[in-house]
Image: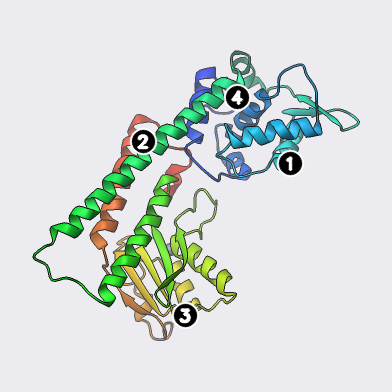
Amino acid sequence: MNEIGAALTANDWVERMSQLALRQGVHLSTLQQKAGGDLEMFFASATLAFPSGASFTEKEANEILKRFLAGAGVMVATDHVELRRWMVDAGFLQRSDHGTDYRRGAMPDWLSNAAQQLDFERIAGAVGHARSANESQREARRQAWLASQIEVTEGGEGDAKVVGEASADETFMRLALDQAHNAWALSEVPVGAVVVKDNKILATGFNQPIGNADPTAHAEIRAMRAASQLLGNYRLNDCELYVTLEPCAMCAGAMQHARIKRLIYGAADSKTGACGSVIDLFAEPRLNHHTEVRAGVLADESRRLLSSFFVERRELKRQGSLPPDADDAE
Ligand SMILES: [Zn+2]
């Protein structure tokens, strides 16, 4: 990775934008915090979308930035107005004295050589290619996983058919596992959750602390937050929460505040599990009066999903193509 100050080559630039392209919902402030000048490179890429030498009205500048954010810049969660302001503040766009026209600003030294060799189409093409390749990989992975699920379901012919509550638990846990795939698609540790009331899904959530730059963005918290907003009530009385991995202390605490009626989880988490693996917050009667806990529903599937994710991540790390920020996840 290039540090700020070391000149970037055009190839490195395109490569880095292609890596960033695999992410989604990245905030400008997150790019800013990262070493390696990602934010400047991102702004510079947007700058290249402005034909050099020309000047643009605010409306034209907005159109160019909108197109950029729908294409090469799609991984970043911002709008054209915020982006324009940041780019003007950072000098990547120049605004005329009367504030009506915009033109390309100067590139910082470490990007200026590469910028001369690059045209915007090359960046946009590489980003589009990286995203569609990633999309087909994801789809293949999901299909393979679904196929393995069908084998699991059909394989157990000698087993007694599970009926009633148990099979409802498995059905909802499969939906939680599907949510976990959404986390994986964004290179986040695949954990998913659903909140159920009266046998209906009220809300879903998946793990996304990195993309959201939010240490509380665990699957359970996101699902409970969405359910609470839907009900207009911070108490989730009579709700059941399904999550693919044993909840941590934060999530277990939030469930107790929300008075979740029943918690159903998949795999145990020996590192941070707060339902018996490390501590058991639900066994403490001074804390927990409300939540009944069932462990181990589709635990194998959940564990397999997590271990495939970490295998893939080690492989990406070995190839040096780990998506940015992914190091923070463990
Ligand atoms: Zn948690």
Q: Is residue 100 above or below residue 158?
A: above
The residue that disc 3 covers is 259
Tell me the SS state at disc 4. Answer: loop
Under mark 3, the amino acid is: Arg
The residue that disc 1 covers is 81
In depth, the one of 12 and 162 nearer the eye is 162
Under mark 1, the amino acid is: Val
The residue that disc 2 covers is 317
Image depth: mark 1 or mark 3 in front: 1
Residues marked 3 and 2 touching at CB (< 8 Å): no
Is 88 positioned to the left or the right of 230 in the image?
A: right
Image disc number at residue 201? none
Distance from the alpha carbon under mark 1 to that under mark 2: 36 Å
Q: For residue 85, which quarter of the picture? A: top right
Under mark 4, the amino acid is: Gly
The residue that disc 4 covers is 5
Q: Is residue 90 above or below residue 214?
A: above
Distance from the alpha carbon under mark 3 to that under mark 4: 53 Å
Q: Earlier in the sequence, mark 4 or mark 1?
A: 4
Image depth: mark 3 or mark 4 in front: 3
